[in-house]
Amino acid sequence: KEFIRAAVVPAGYAVVGAAAFNGGVTHTLSPGIIILEMTGESAYTFPVLFGVMCAVFVARMFSDSVYTQITKDKNMPFLPDLRSKYFRLTAGELMDSNVPMLPRDARLSEIQQILKAVPKDEPVPIVNNLEEATLLGQVSTEDLRRHMAALRFSRKTVASNGLNYHLATDTITRRG
């Protein structure tokens, strides 16, 4: 009953305005909660939260939050806006299921085929075998090309970056 009958004094409007302004700038509801905690007045709960929610709603329609804008201005990496046509897609609809994979015991000919299929600077997943496709790690195409070049100049075992090439079995295995 005290909440309903409480009179809001003119300073209360300043509190509501300050909370709404900060909520609009930051696009969050936390300024309203912080101001309610600081004032300790339950009479301002509804006006403060309603003002902050309205400010956040309007601000999100017209601008980025201050944090997003600072991140963009400093050319720092940030998460893009998720409100796009891809937002409603499931992972299965978005993923490409035909990813070239390198089995742990891949032969030289398989590695050459994968290097032709995968774009430059793309990682290639290393799996235990093609049937189970349990991910063991990944290797860059640059590392694979470097290993292939080393094999052309040397007919012995090449060991680098955790991969071993065995000439006798024509396979690459993970060291360790």
Image (tube, rainbow, N blue to C red):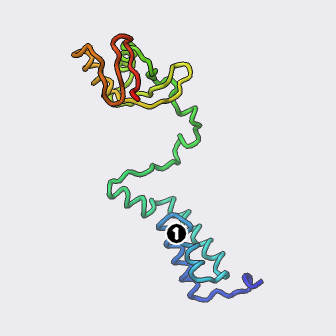
Q: Is residue 102 above or below residue 69?
A: above
Q: Is residue 88 left or right of residue 143?
A: right
Q: Position of residue 59 (x, y in %)?
A: 50, 63
| Percent of width and height locating residue 127 | 48, 25
What residue occupies the far front of the structure in this picture?
176
Circle 1 residue: 23
Relative height, residue 95 to residue 164 (above, below): below
Q: Nearer the viewer, residue 157 or 69?
A: 157
Horizontal and vertical percent for residue 28? 53, 65
Given the current orientation, which residue lies at the most extreme left position? Answer: 153
Residue 65's quadrant in the figure?
bottom left
Q: Residue at x 72, y 82 (%)?
A: 3
Quarter of the figure with residue 109 = top left
Compared with 150, 139 (above or below) is below
Q: Which x, y percent locates residue 112? A: 35, 16
- Residue, far right: 1
Left or right: residue 176 compared with residue 151: right
Q: Is residue 86 above or below residue 21?
A: above
Judge left or right: residue 111 versus residue 59: left
The front one of 15 and 134 is 134
The residue positioned farthest toward the top in the image shown = 168
Tell me the quadrant of the picture where the N terminus can be found.
bottom right
10 Å neighbourhood of mark 1: few (<14), some, or many (≥20)?
A: many
Q: How many marks?
A: 1
Q: Amino acid at mark 1?
A: Gly
Q: Residue at 31% of width from left, 25% of height from top? A: 159
Q: Residue at x 44, y 18 (%)?
A: 105
The residue closer to the viewer here, 168 or 161, is: 168
**In which quadrant will I find the C terminus?**
top left
Secondary structure at badge 1 equals helix
